Image: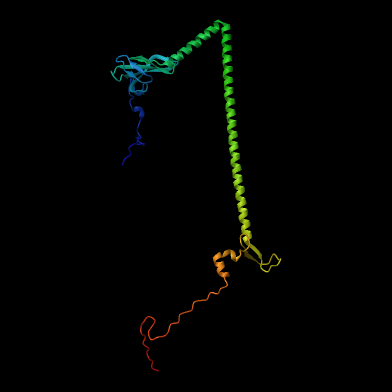
């Protein structure tokens, strides 16, 4: 079975790539690319809304006579999903964005307006400070006060976090010490029980010399003793009723055995006939 994807291709020895004619294409040829809508827009023909991320098969070309510091600007052609009207938009390297060009209008984006307003306020503030030095001093004083407040709040947060961390470490340390103390008590109790068991074994199985001599080299025997206490009295091992019977002075006579008389009949009523044996 041949491979589905051929990795090695045969090239004849007399192959000359310079003899292959080059394909002639126009200078600004369009390419078909697959892309997603870079921003939400509304079609100017039918009013259909096209959300950001909608996929299109677009045509791409380079804009002639426009660039941004040597960066090329590209134009894309798409069609409306409802009326198939042509919509174009271009790249905007200056703002790292895209700009609607023809056939659709970009939807309102509040965050873009906020950025524009902030930029306008900053430029107005700079112009005012250049015209009025006292205003610049006031602005710097306000900015310094704001920075000091932010630093104080940050320092308070850091101190609070450090205090909480110390409290947590103290609780962890106390819990660890408590666990170590519990483990130490358990080990101590276990060791005490083991020592008691060893002492009990030593007392039960004691070794003494066989000849009761003081010579340590003499052979020894193992003497098994009782675990605790002396040997109990026999009276303590016998029940009171049995003890009363033992202490009773009356002699109990054994019943007489019944002697069976020999008769011609057996004990079972069967007549036994004796045979004479000839000598």
Using the image as rendered, state which of residue 49 and residue 63 is in the foreground: 49
Residue 27's place in the image compared with 238, above or below, is above
- Left or right: 115 as drawn, with respect to 273: right
Indicate the quadrant where residue 262 lies: bottom left
Residue 49: give x, y in percent of width and height. Answer: 33, 18
Nearer-the-camera pick, 138 or 157? 157
Residue at position x 57%, y 24% from top? 157
Q: Quadrant of residue 10?
A: top left
Q: Is residue 125 above or below residue 159?
A: above
Considering every residue shown, the one lying at the far left of the view is: 83
Q: Position of residue 67 (x, y in %)?
A: 42, 15
* Residue plotted at (62% across, 51% down): 192
- 6 relative position to 168: left or right: left
Q: Residue furthest top?
A: 131
Q: Quadrant of the C terminus?
A: bottom left
Q: Residue at x 36, y 27 (%)?
A: 18
Instruction: Give x and y (percent) for residue 130.
Output: 55, 7
Identity of the residue drawn at 57% across and 32% down = 168
Seen from the viewer's position, the closer of residues 140 and 230 is 230
């Amino acid at each position: 079975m041949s491979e589905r994807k051929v990795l090695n291709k045969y090239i004849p020895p007399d192959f000359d790539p310079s003899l292959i004619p080059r394909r002639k294409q126009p200078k600004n040829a369009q390419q078909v690319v697959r892309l997603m809508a870079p921003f939400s827009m509304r079609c100017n023909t039918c009013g259909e809304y096209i959300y950001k991320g909608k996929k299109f098969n677009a045509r791409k070309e380079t804009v002639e006579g426009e660039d941004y510091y040597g960066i090329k600007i590209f134009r894309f052609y798409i069609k409306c999903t409802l009326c198939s009207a042509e919509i174009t938009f271009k790249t905007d390297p200056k703002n790292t964005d895209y700009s609607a060009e023809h056939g659709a209008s970009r939807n309102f984006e509040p965050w873009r307006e906020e950025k524009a307003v902030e930029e306008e306020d900053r430029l107005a503030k700079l112009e005012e400070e250049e015209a009025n030095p006292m205003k610049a001093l006031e602005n710097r004083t306000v900015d310094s006060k704001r920075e000091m407040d932010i630093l104080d709040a940050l320092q308070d947060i850091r101190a609070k976090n450090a205090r909480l961390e110390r409290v947590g470490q103290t609780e962890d340390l106390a819990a660890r010490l408590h666990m170590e103390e519990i483990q130490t008590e358990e080990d101590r109790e276990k060791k005490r029980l083991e020592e008691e068991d060893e002492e009990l074994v030593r007392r039960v199985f004691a070794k003494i010399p066989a000849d009761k001599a003081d010579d340590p080299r003499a052979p020894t025997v193992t003497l098994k003793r009782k675990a605790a206490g002396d040997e109990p009295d026999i009276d303590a091992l016998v029940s009171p009723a049995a003890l009363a019977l033992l202490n009773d002075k009356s002699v109990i006579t054994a019943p007489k055995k019944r002697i069976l008389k020999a008769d011609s009949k057996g004990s079972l009523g069967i007549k036994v006939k004796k045979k004479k044996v000839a000598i």
